[in-house]
Image (cartoon, rainbow, N blue to C red):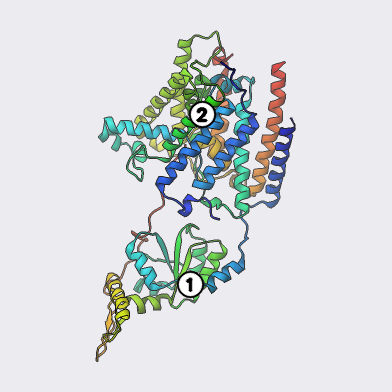
């Protein structure tokens, strides 16, 4: 019976501890860990990295647009979802998803990033430069004809991505071309092929 | 660390199947060690002769429940990613009543009859066949009972949210009830063996 | 032949089972199961014999559409394969593998077999209605404190005790 008594004591201690604590989740995130992530630049993703990942479509990414609805409906990154900060915190976005946040410049996105990090989201990034950066790098990249060979490779890549996302590469000659709005306005939609729907919940037995 | 590992993409679906096999080995091993390969031992529960079923089941439940609570509290496991089965009150109640009758009549439940069968119990094999027939019967009449099957849905409700208690308090109450139950079970067995 | 070893202390066996269940939660984010695996087998069988019939049935379809396309390449099916191996291994090391029929010594084998089969039918049907059995609902759902699982568990015990009288000759 001594073994059983030991087991009973363990159960009582763990059970009583649970009752005293109440909630099984606690805010035990180490803030300095978050600071370190920002310093080592693991908090953001560049427009090119995002565009390449989206184009490959191998990894599911949830893209969140934190701007106002007018800007959102006039243009947003394909697959993005419009959310306010508050909606984001109470949304169904799960901790195991890869989340990319963007606003126009980046302030809102950075703030949202910190909030999500404190909620222990591990794979969340801001888009470097915000939508402005996306426009400059992906939609309307400037292609200089006098670029060096190394630069040219990168520019070719940018041009490819730009066309894929229906932007207009800006080729600088003597007379600068006029910027176009992207031809097609992407309608509001749920994230598409780059975001796989969660598996249906089947009976566990 | 991030658990559940599979939910954080630490390995793919094929690896998950291999893991399933090994988890199954552990499951089968402890079922057999507990004596659940024997219909006589299982049925003993319902004649107050041998309360092993109750003891093993509730010990397993409180072990896993306490484990989940503390792993979550230490930040190791994200409880929101562990799937809670949704509740459909009336079908589950009726299903439980039919299941209970089948249990005392047949002597096994779906998991234990596998263990009974591989340890040589012929009634375990027959029981297994009957179960396939029952599942087939359900599948065939499913179109006619689908509406009822999906009725009285309560979603992913837990006892804690139902009684509006903190999760940990509900855990403690279940542990307390289980321990009192174990005490009662030991006394009962002593009385019946006299 | 040596005598079979005694069964494990029920509380230790329970802790072992609980830790296996906890491992499933930690590694997979899901619990254990049994009846789901049998449903996969039934669905695969029906699909082989009468594919059109299986595909028109919502319930079978749910079990046929696994990510791999093969209904038997399913988590629970592999888990049950493990249960068979684990159960056999445990029985073997404890010298409990023996061809026998579980019943009270005076009870006729034919009646026992009839009730084993008929009980199996009820068990299969009941576990489908309840969306799980003692493993998937009672153990897994019980540990997660799911309301439906506790309702199921209480119903199982209540019903089994209520009907135990009618089967006493089989077990006593």
Identify the residue at horizontal 74%, vertical 34% (top origin).
Answer: A5
Picture quarter with the C terminus of chain C: top right
Relative height, residue B55 to residue A40 (above, below): above
| Res B144 visible | no
Relative height, residue B131 to residue A42 (above, below): above
Are labels 2 and 1 assigned to the same chain? no
Residue A123 percent location from the top left of the image: 48, 62
Residue B159 percent location from the top left of the image: 59, 43
Picture disc at residue C116: none
Q: Residues within 10 Å of mark 1 (few under 14, many from 20)?
A: many
| Res B35 visible | yes
Residue A177 percent location from the top left of the image: 26, 86
Determine the residue located farthest toward the bottom in the rendered image. A174
In which quadrant of the rendered view does residue C80 lie?
Answer: top left
Q: Is residue C136 left or right of residue C45?
A: right
Residue picked out by circle 1:
A109
Picture disc at residue C89: 2
Determine the residue located farthest toward the front in the rendered image. C1
Identify the residue at horizontal 69%, vertical 44% (top origin).
Answer: A15
Provide the secondary structure element on which disc 2 rests: helix
Camera-nearest residue between C28 and C94: C94
Residue A133 percent location from the top left of the image: 40, 78
Give the CA separation, mark 2 to mark 1: 56 Å
């Amino acid at each position: 019976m001594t073994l059983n008594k030991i087991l009973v004591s363990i159960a009582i201690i763990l059970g009583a501890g649970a009752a005293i604590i109440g909630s099984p989740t606690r805010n035990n995130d180490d803030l300095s860990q978050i600071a370190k992530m920002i310093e080592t630049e693991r908090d953001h993703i560049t427009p090119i990295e995002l565009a390449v990942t989206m184009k490959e479509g191998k990894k599911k990414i949830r893209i969140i647009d934190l701007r106002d609805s007018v800007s959102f409906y006039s243009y947003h990154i394909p697959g993005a979802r419009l959310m306010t900060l508050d909606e984001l915190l109470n949304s169904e976005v799960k901790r195991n998803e890869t989340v990319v946040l963007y606003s126009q410049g980046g302030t809102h996105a950075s703030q949202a990033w910190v909030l999500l990090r404190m909620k222990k989201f591990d794979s969340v990034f801001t888009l470097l430069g915000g939508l402005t950066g996306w426009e400059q790098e992906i939609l309307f990249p400037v292609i200089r004809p006098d670029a060096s060979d190394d630069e040219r490779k990168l520019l070719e890549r940018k041009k490819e991505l730009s066309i894929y996302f229906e932007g207009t590469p800006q080729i600088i000659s003597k007379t600068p071309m006029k910027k176009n709005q992207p031809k097609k306005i992407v309608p509001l939609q749920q994230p598409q092929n780059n975001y796989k729907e969660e598996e249906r919940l089947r009976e566990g037995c | 660390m991030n658990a559940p590992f599979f939910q954080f993409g630490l390995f793919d679906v094929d690896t998950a199947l291999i893991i399933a096999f090994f988890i199954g080995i552990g499951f089968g091993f402890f079922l057999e060690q507990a004596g659940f390969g024997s219909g006589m031992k299982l049925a003993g529960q319902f004649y107050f002769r041998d309360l092993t079923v109750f003891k093993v089941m509730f010990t397993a439940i409180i072990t896993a429940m306490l484990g989940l609570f503390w792993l979550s509290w230490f930040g190791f496991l994200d409880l929101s990613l562990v799937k809670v089965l949704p509740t459909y009150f009336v079908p589950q109640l009726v299903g439980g009543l039919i299941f209970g009758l089948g249990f005392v009549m047949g002597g096994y439940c779906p998991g234990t009859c596998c263990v009974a069968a591989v340890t040589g119990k012929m009634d375990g094999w027959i029981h297994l066949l009957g179960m396939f027939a029952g599942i087939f019967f359900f599948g065939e009449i499913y179109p006619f009972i689908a509406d009822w099957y999906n009725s009285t849905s309560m979603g992913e409700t837990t006892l804690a949210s139902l009684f509006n208690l903190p999760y940990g308090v509900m855990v403690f109450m279940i542990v307390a009830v289980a321990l009192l139950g174990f005490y009662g079970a030991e006394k009962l067995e002593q009385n019946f063996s006299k | 032949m040596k005598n079979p070893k005694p069964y494990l202390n029920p509380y230790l066996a329970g802790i072992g089972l609980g830790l296996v269940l906890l491992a499933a939660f930690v590694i997979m984010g899901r619990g254990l199961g049994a009846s789901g695996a049998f449903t996969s087998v039934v669905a695969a069988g029906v699909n082989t014999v009468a594919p059109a019939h299986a595909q028109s049935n919502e319930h079978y379809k749910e079990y046929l559409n696994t990510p791999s396309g093969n209904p038997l390449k399913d988590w629970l099916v592999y888990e049950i394969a493990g249960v068979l191996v684990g159960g056999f291994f445990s029985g073997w090391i404890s010298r409990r593998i023996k061809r026998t029929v579980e019943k009270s010594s005076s009870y006729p084998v034919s009646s026992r077999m009839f009730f084993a089969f008929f009980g199996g039918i009820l068990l299969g049907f009941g576990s489908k209605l309840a969306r799980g059995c003692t493993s998937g609902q009672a153990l897994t759902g019980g540990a997660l404190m799911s309301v439906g699982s506790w309702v199921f568990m209480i119903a199982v015990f209540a019903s089994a005790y209520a009907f135990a009288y009618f089967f006493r000759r089989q077990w006593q």
